[in-house]
């Protein structure tokens, strides 16, 4: 025990500084891995915001058409329903592909952009034509059937991708400006 006491006295007599522990590492500056994670999260959020905004822009004409369709619930307004479908279609497809369609071609166009289980314009072709051109209009039950089919098209039609719309519209605009310059 005397040896341990003399060892402590000897250690105390030496000019040694106290042991200082280093400071705990801080959070800053961040390691490169954390920067990569932050960048990945920011890019993901930016892409999601972009996709959601593009989807909302793409659906704007469809939503407006559905809002207007709710006010067209009278058989005397059947021509306006057909016009609304045509305007909506021209919002998504080039004018040259839609504007010239009439009769069965128009109804086939509408059906072609619906899934097989939702198609029905061609099957009600006679009633649809009568609703547009007949002065007496449609009976309430027939009108209801046509109205339902129009509503289905506005809700479920397969629309072209945004890129396709832009390409088709720019191609159409380029052709139009070329034709105007030729005149």
Image: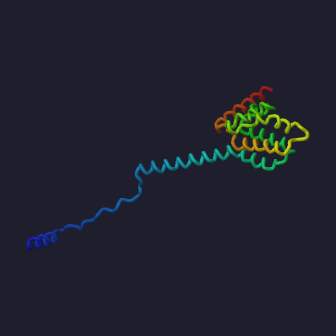
Which residue of the protein is positioned furthest toward the top in this rendering? 182
142 left or right of 48 in image: right
**Figure check: 78 above or below 183:** below
Which residue of the protein is positioned furthest toward the left in this rendering? 2
Residue 41 percent coordinates (x, y): 50, 50
**Figure check: 129 above or below 3:** above
Q: What quarter of the picture does the C terminus occupy?
A: top right
Quadrant housing residue 23: bottom left
The residue lying toward the viewer, choosing from 67 and 151, is 151
169 left or right of 3 in image: right
Which residue of the protein is positioned furthest toward the right in this rendering? 135
Residue 39 percent coordinates (x, y): 49, 48
The residue lying toward the viewer, choosing from 56 and 82, is 82
Measuring 86% from the left and 43% from the top, which residue is drawn there? 139
Q: What quarter of the picture does the N terminus occupy?
A: bottom left
Quadrant housing residue 177: top right
Residue 135 percent coordinates (x, y): 91, 39
Residue 62 percent coordinates (x, y): 72, 44
């Amino acid at each position: 025990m005397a040896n341990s006491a003399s060892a402590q006295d000897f250690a105390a007599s030496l000019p040694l500084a106290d042991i200082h522990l280093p400071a705990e590492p801080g959070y800053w500056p961040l390691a490169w891995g954390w920067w990569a994670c932050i960048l990945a999260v920011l890019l993901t959020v930016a892409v999601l915001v972009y996709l959601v905004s593009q989807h909302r822009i793409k659906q704007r004409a469809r939503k407006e058409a559905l809002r207007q369709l709710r006010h067209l619930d009278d058989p005397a307004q059947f021509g306006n329903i057909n016009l609304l479908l045509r305007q909506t279609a021209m919002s998504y497809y080039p004018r040259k592909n839609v504007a010239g369609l009439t009769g069965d071609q128009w109804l086939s166009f509408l059906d072609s952009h619906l899934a097989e289980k939702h198609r029905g314009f061609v099957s009600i072709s006679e009633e649809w034509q009568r609703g547009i051109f007949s002065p007496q209009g449609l009976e309430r039950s027939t009108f209801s059937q046509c109205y339902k089919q129009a509503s289905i098209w506005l809700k479920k039609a397969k629309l072209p991708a945004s890129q396709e719309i832009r390409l088709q519209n720019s191609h159409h605009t380029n052709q139009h400006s070329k034709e105007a310059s030729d005149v």
